[in-house]
Amino acid sequence: MDNTAVSGSYHGVEIGSPEFDALYAYDGNDLGFEWNPDATTFRIWAPTAAQVSLNLYDSDQSSDAPLRESVAMARHDKGVWSATVLGDLRDQAYDYQVTFEDGSSNTTPDPYAVAAVVNGHRSVVLAPEQMTIPDFPRMSHFSSLQTDARIAELSVRDSTISPTSGVSEAHRGKFLGLTEKGTTNSFGKSTGLDYLVKLGVTHVQIMPMYDFESVDETKPFSDDNYNWGYDPLNYNVPEGSFSTNPYDPATRIREAKLMVRALHEAGIRVVMDVVYNHVYSLKTHPLALSVPGYFFRTVDGKLTSRSFCGNDVASERAMGRKYIIDSLRYWIENFRLDGIRFDILGLIDNETIRQARAMMDEIDTSILAYGEGWDMHADLPTEQMTVQEYANLVDNQEGRGSRTGSTVGFFNDSLRDNLKGADFDSEPTSRGFVTGQPGKERIIAYNMLGTQPTQDEEIVKSHGTAMNHADASQVVQYAEIHDGMTLFDKLAISLGYAELDEQGNPITSSPVLRNLDGEKLQDVARRQMLATAAALLAQGVPEIQLGQEFLRTKDGEHNSYNTGDTQNAIDWNRLANPVAARVARFVRDLWALRASTPAFRYSSYQQINAHASVLAMENGVVAWRVSDESHAYTVVLNANEVSQQVREVSSGYYEVLCENSEVVEPRALEVAHGFTAAGLSVNVLRSSVL
């Protein structure tokens, strides 16, 4: 993080002001390098520079290779500098020396680099064929409804780094780890790619896979050389530590594409997690080095850090907006991405997000777009923030009935926190609906019907930050994601099953959670199925974190972003535990039930309100009914430890589809005086619509 003063002007115009943009904003699509066999042209936007030189180095394998040649660049309109170098420059490492009018200078990688040396501090020229893989078309149009998606979040490294993944040692924790077929854990159960297919997800959301700064690509993986990657260095370059050869600039590009292709061939679409709201360090980031003072927000001459992760990108400025949209287009077009997940979306202005959504629609209107709409108190006018309170402002769809357009979704902390308790490190033992906290039934029922705008004071009071969605396709329903404790850990801790220190925080070095068994494990598992089912059956876009469905633990760690593989690696052998295996089977079957039942996937609130109603929301029970043209479905969630007679379920003839948190072959059931729901259970009944 850098909070140094950055206020300044250029020729009497404040850098970053609207007047500055009017003079210098560039709308060309040719920044970066343009390779041809006989010459390569380099272009960089640096309007405040007095001089820019292109540095060419002897090797593309290292950041320490000696300088071979420095080429003076020519200034053009809007502050774009260019130079053309004759010859075939494939594999040429380069950077820029940007000198300012006060005599100071910065050496910077190319902000538009698509390839880099190991650890990313110099850029590299590649010919198109070096970055190409065969048989790599876009997948066909997915669906006009984002609510048809079933998403699992995963990390490239976490998903296959463990020997229990069965992935070959050379590919563990790498892009290629997710291309291997036939992998199994120590007990012969499917893992990795094959497991994802069996799980039944339509999309995987991949945590940062662009080039981030916090992992040393020259060193092997270790607990001391680990990070989730929310610290961008080269936005348009894949991460080198996920490559089998980080020293070869082309390898990481091809292997990232091979991973996407393998997932596509398995019928799974790919959502990329992007972090355009902040960077790790202005001392090394090309946006800061190329045009100091422009790409980052300031207040009173100080750089802001509302993300608490670094300094905030000024997306509302013309070239900040252009850079984000150009970068998104590059990834979507070249890596055939099917969706974008925006980290801390609340720090990006909503006009940038609207334009980004419009760009995606030019390619494919079924590309998913969603993110974290938390109100981080961004230094923007309120009406420009991309937060849940103003979610409808980034909904580009026309016609609320058919929902054939596009939108941008938001993670729903209202459901998350009310299901399991607040998910902050200061409240590890807090409880929610599934752990017996009274008074949560109403807010859970509200979320089951798509988290609609409401004036209900009781709901608003315990609402989280969710509100003002245009429809359910803007609502990402979830109980667990990479942030915070795993659902298993949160539930076990709040139930008193973990070892705590004197301050009441979990002792993350303790093996208690990882080794939980017997009645305690059964208890957590039943509650885990309740919480997960609520997210999967709610109107909206459901998402889980990979491993949630087989009781993944991180030993109670709340923020494992740098705690290493020991806590973050998925232990695929947990699938051999009968209790965890039952939860996994339940989640898989529930995905299938949702996929086969349009009534669980409405998008417009008009449709939901015409076809759904709450039946019960008190005394630890939430029940609702939703119908389509031929059938009605009654869902009963019982968070009590003992069975409950739910008299609000109408008398009549039903088929039982899910009973006591197990999806079953349909069987007939006559309900006369209410439905009896077992303790801590999920139940789904189907009846005919007369």
Image: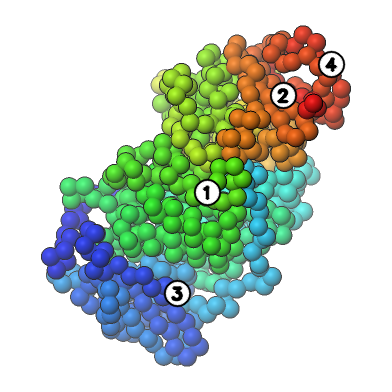
3D distance between C-alphas at marks 1 and 4: 43 Å
Q: Are marks 3 and 2 in contact (CB under 8 Å)?
A: no
**Mark nearer the viewer, 3 or 1:** 1
Q: Is residue 72 left or right of residue 131?
A: left
Which of the pair 302/22 is nearer the observer?
22
- Residue 662: percent from the left, percent from the top? 76, 27
Q: Are marks 4 and 3 in contact (CB under 8 Å)?
A: no
What secondary structure is found at the residue carrying circle 1?
Answer: loop
Q: Are marks 4 and 2 in contact (CB under 8 Å)?
A: no
Is residue 572 among the parts visible in the rendering?
yes
**Mark nearer the viewer, 3 or 2:** 2
Mark 2 lies on residue: 634
Mark 4 lies on residue: 670
Mark 3 lies on residue: 124
3D distance between C-alphas at marks 3 and 1: 40 Å
- The tag earlier along the polypeptide, 1 or 4, is 1
- Tag 3: amino acid: Val
Residue 397, numbered label: 1
